[in-house]
Image: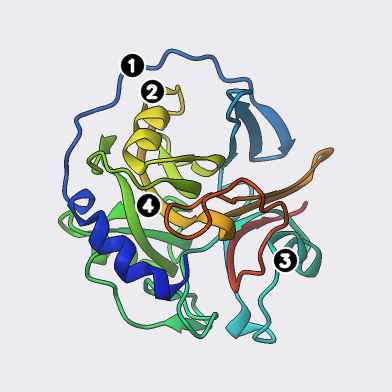
Amino acid sequence: MRVYRILAWTLSCGVALTPAAAFGPPPTATVTWRTLQPGVDYAVIDEAAPLHVVRIDASRSPIEALFATAEDRRARTAAEWCRFKGLAVAINLGMYGQDQLTSVGHAHTSSHVNNARWAPAYKSALGLARLRQDLPPALLVDLDAPGAREQLSAYGTVIQNLRLIRAPGRNVWTEQPRRWSEAAVASDATGRILFIFSRHPYSMADLNQKLLSLPFGITTAMHVEGGPEASLSIHVGGVDLDLSGSYETGFNENDAQRRQWPIPNVLATPRR
């Protein structure tokens, strides 16, 4: 969702930015995980509308933020990012602006600042590259929780995005008619990070309820992209997938898009 769609999109579903639905229903499905490399597991839920989930233990397989502005300023598909940087898994880092390079939310590493500004409406942030070994290797926090900024100051990388699920597992979206293919990043109760992709279009309220109904133990989640830009690539452990979104209400209302779009920034874990 590039910046020229963000304002209309946010205004049309602005009610979704305040807490709404209660905790999701109890887990009902069985998830079979496949280990792709140490610290990286993969599962597919629901054959009719596949939900792809990569679960990463960042203490065993570190998660990185990669920016075109820190490289050659060239946007790449998630598949191309994997080839370029030797990545096992790559997903969108977040929505980006009209320059097709800058993340809409705050985004920096210890050596590079992609966007120094904070987006007031974005209430989720992911901390990576911990500065102390006594901290979790990855931390997804609610920015309106007490002490959140102080927690993030102990991480070299911080990525801000629009919130989907608020700790400890609360759907913050009310029902609305807009729906889209989705790429999301979540955290479970043990601190593992989940890269989530659905080509099937959902409203965010419905997707959140689905995620909370599954035995992932999700406590927090953030939106990293929707529509045809949504991407997930997996190239490790005998799995070679380059997934792309398609449908987005008011922009691309079809399932015809089959190729990944170039994106300027990704969250990823390296191949080992």
Do residues under tags 1 and 2 come within 8 Å of each other at their CB atoms? yes
Query: Which residue carries the number 2 mark?
Result: 213
Give the image location of residue 43, x and y in percent. Answer: 63, 30
Left or right of 97, for residue 65: right
In percent of width and height, residue 88 lies at 73, 52
Q: Say what amino acid the circle numbered 3 marks.
A: Trp
Badge number at residue 26: 1
Secondary structure of residue under mark 1? loop
- Among numbered discs 4 and 3, the one appearing first in the sequence: 3
88 on left or right of 147: right
Amino acid of disc 1: Pro
Query: In what element is the residue under mark 4?
Result: strand
Foreground disc of the pair 4, 1? 1
Residue beneath the point at 68% across and 82% down: 74
Query: Can you give x and y, in whole percent of width and height, for residue 3 in the image?
Result: 42, 74
Q: From the image, tell me which residue sits under label 4.
A: 140
Q: On the rendered structure, is 227 left or right of 68? A: left
Name the N-terminal-most of marks 1 and 3. 1
How far is mark 2 from mark 4, CA to CA?
A: 20 Å
Please identify, in this view, whether the residue under mark 4 or under mark 3 is nearer the observer.
Answer: 3
Residue at image coords 61%, 69%:
263
**Crowdedness of circle 4 by 10 Å Cα count: few (<14), some, many (20+)?**
many
The amino acid type, in three-letter code, at marker 2 is Ser
Residue 168 seen by the camera: no
Mark sitting on residue 81 = 3
